[in-house]
Structure formats: C-alpha cells, structure tokens
C-alpha cells in the first residue's frame, strides 16, 4: 500500500512539474541561429522571434541568455501582449532589453511607442516617449522624455507619464514644464495645463490638480462660414 501511494505521489509531482514547465516554455525562432556556451546564449538574426505564454517579441536581431532569461533585441523591435481582459498591447522601438521571467524591460530608439487597444472599445490609445520602462506584462510603464499621449478625444504632452493598467490610469506631473492637454469634443476645444494630470482612459476622463490654467473654446454659427 505504501509503495502504491509513493508511486502515485511521484506521478502527480511529475505531471505538475511538466505542466508548469510547459506553461512557461520559451520558444526562440529566426532565419539564422547561433548557439553558444552549450545553449546558454542564443543569437538569432533575421525574423527573430521569442514567444513565452501570451507574450511575443520580434526583431531583426536578438540574443537570448538562458541562465537569466534576458533578451537583447535590436532593429524593428515589436512586443505583443494579449491580456486576459481582452485588451491588446503592442509596443515598438529600435532597441530593447527584456526579461521573459518577470516581463520587465526597457525600450528606446526610434521613438518608442505603446499602442493600447482598449477592452470593449474601438478606440486605441498611443503613448510615445524617448524611453520606456515596462514591468509585469506592460501592467506598468514609466515613460520619460517628450511624452505624447494620443487618443480619439485629444492629446496630452508631458515630460513623463506613469501607466497603471490595473487602475486604467496615466499620471503625469510637472518637472520643468506643466503637462498640457488638448481635448476635442463636438464643437468644443479645451486647452489646459496643470502640475498634475491623471487620465482615466477607460472612462475618457481627465483630472487636473495644482495650478490649473486653461480655456475652453466653443464654435458658434457666427464663427462658421
């Protein structure tokens, strides 16, 4: 009886380990591949692609380090993340470093962009910056330098932005310059600046705090030809 129970335990342990390993399997493909140091370092050139779970990274050239799960990617770098809530994130840059274990990394070069297709919406939000730091499957992103956020309802210009996908917010604050929002709705045009601006993008709502200044312009029949 003890022997049967032991065999059953070993079998269950093996199945659990195999499932976990399969779930987190990393697949690397490309046109030309060079494997060094007994598989610890893989260099891929031409249509380089790495897939893990719901995440895909493609580039012209890619180096994968098996021991720490780091990826160095260069040339037409593209990230695809299919989220469980139905939203899709696409990010692009010319250079990137990425860790497939914790889904964190940095994107720079070629005006890095996060393209976020909102859940249950045809609207798409674009986040541009000089450099992007991302974490946890793009749940969080820290944008730095010449940040521009574009959606169908307007544009926000800032020196920085913090994306929190769990809270569906983008937060910007003054460094040297106040973040500025230019919004459009029907016959209204709004231009505002503030020390702090929060964008609740699912609700298409903006909250401004501290030293708010701006104006709202409305089109009139007299002003139209």
Image (cartoon, helix red, strand yellow):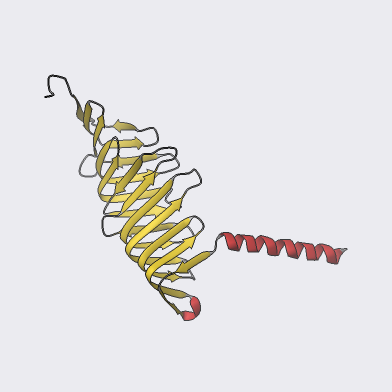
Specify the quadrant of the image occupied by residue 92.
bottom left
**x 35%, y 48%: residue:** 115
Left or right placement of residue 41 versus residue 130 in this view: right
Quadrant of the frame with the C terminus: top left
Give the image location of residue 58, x and y in percent. Answer: 39, 62
Q: Residue furthest top?
A: 222
User: Who is closer to the viewer here, 190 or 59?
Assistant: 59
Number of numbered discs overlaid on the protein picture: 0
Specify the quadrant of the image occupied by residue 189.
top left
User: Who is closer to the viewer here, 99 or 73?
Assistant: 73
User: Who is closer to the viewer here, 144 or 61?
Assistant: 61
- Against 132, residue 176 (above or below) is above
**x 41%, y 37%: residue:** 121
Give the image location of residue 22, x and y in percent. Answer: 59, 62
Q: Residue furthest bottom?
A: 37
Give the image location of residue 72, x and y in percent. Answer: 38, 67
Quadrant of the frame with the N terminus: bottom right
Q: Residue furthest right?
A: 1
**x 30%, y 37%: residue:** 152
Give the image location of residue 106, x and y in percent. Answer: 35, 58
Specify the quadrant of the image occupied by residue 201.
top left
């Amino acid at each position: 009886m003890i022997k049967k129970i032991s065999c059953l335990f070993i079998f269950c342990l093996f199945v659990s380990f195999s499932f976990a390993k399969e779930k987190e399997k990393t697949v690397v493909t490309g046109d030309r591949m060079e494997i060094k140091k007994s598989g610890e370092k893989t260099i891929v050139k031409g249509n380089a692609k790495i897939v893990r779970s719901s995440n895909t990274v493609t580039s012209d050239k890619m180096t994968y380090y098996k021991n720490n799960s780091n990826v160095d990617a260069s040339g037409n770098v593209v990230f695809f993340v299919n989220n469980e809530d139905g939203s899709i994130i696409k990010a692009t840059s010319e250079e990137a470093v990425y860790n497939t274990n914790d889904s964190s990394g940095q994107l720079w070069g070629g005006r890095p962009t996060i393209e976020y297709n909102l859940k249950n919406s045809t609207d798409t939000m674009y986040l541009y910056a000089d450099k992007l730091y991302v974490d946890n499957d793009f749940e969080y992103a820290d944008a730095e330098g010449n940040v521009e956020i574009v959606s169908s309802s307007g544009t926000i210009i800032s020196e920085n932005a913090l994306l929190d996908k769990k809270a569906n917010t983008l937060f910007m604050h003054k460094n040297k310059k106040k973040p500025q929002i230019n919004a459009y709705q029907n016959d209204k045009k709004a231009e505002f600046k503030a020390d702090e601006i929060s964008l609740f993008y699912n609700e298409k709502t903006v909250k401004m705090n501290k030293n708010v200044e701006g104006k709202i312009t409305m089109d009139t029949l007299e002003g139209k030809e």
